[in-house]
Image (cartoon, rainbow, N blue to C red):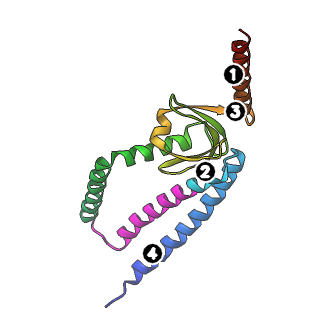
Amino acid sequence: MVIPKEQLFLTLILIIIMMIVIVIIKKAIRKFSFVQAIEINRRKVIFNICFFIIYLISGFFLAIIWGVKFQEFTIFISSVLAVLGVGFFAQWSILSNLTASFILFFYHPIRIGHRIKIIDKDYNWIGEVKNITAFYFFIKTDDGENISLPNSLVMQKGLQILEPGEALKSNDTSTEATETIETIEDGS
């Protein structure tokens, strides 16, 4: 078997370029995240997305270097996309959770560590956001409960961002109001 030296050389150059690009992007993301005050969890996700895109582009160029025919490559990619499309259509909730995760992560004002109140007629959840993953939203309530909600459900509920001590004040006032009502009822 003959080893094609030109393709090995081009592959080595591609790997070196990829490593240089990764180092440059790491530095740029770190600098940008400090300037914009992006927390470490968000920074990790941004790193992972950038690395995925770099590896995807590098894989494409690697396929070109090693002589994969464009027509065969497009047939392969379209087959993979068709299978993914059918899978996501069959599991639409997975796709909606991923989309909701993206929206919560990049566009929603709620961040990990914020105190929130989920506005719901059946539940009174007040607590701290512990984590936002690709599928779930994790909260530790003031009562000590750990609650995980699907991201798509969180997007459907109203959320109120609270100040660090605000939930305690609102609970105290409702207790005072209840005591006042009981006093009035006992007096009459």
Q: Which of marks 4 and 2 is nearer the N terminus?
A: 4
Q: Where is residue 132 in the image (x, y as percent from the top left)?
A: 56, 48
Q: Which of marks 3 and 1 is nearer the N terminus?
A: 3
Residue 167 is tagged as 3
- Tell whether label 1 touches label 4 (CB within 8 Å): no
Callout 2 crowding tier (Cα within 10 Å): few <14, some 14–19, many ≥20: some
Please name the residue shown 40% across and 43% down the image: 96
State whether residue 13 is above or below residue 57. Answer: below
Mark 3 or 1, closer to the camera: 1
Residue 42 is tagged as 2
Q: Which amino acid does label 4 sit on?
A: Thr
Residue carrying label 1: 178
Q: How far apart are marks 2 and 1 (CA)?
A: 42 Å
- Tell whether label 2 touches label 3 (CB within 8 Å): no
Mark 2 element type? helix
Mark 2 or 1, closer to the camera: 1
Residue carrying label 4: 11
Q: Distance between the residues labelled 3 and 1?
A: 17 Å
Residue 92 is inside the magenta segment: no
Callout 4 crowding tier (Cα within 10 Å): few <14, some 14–19, many ≥20: some
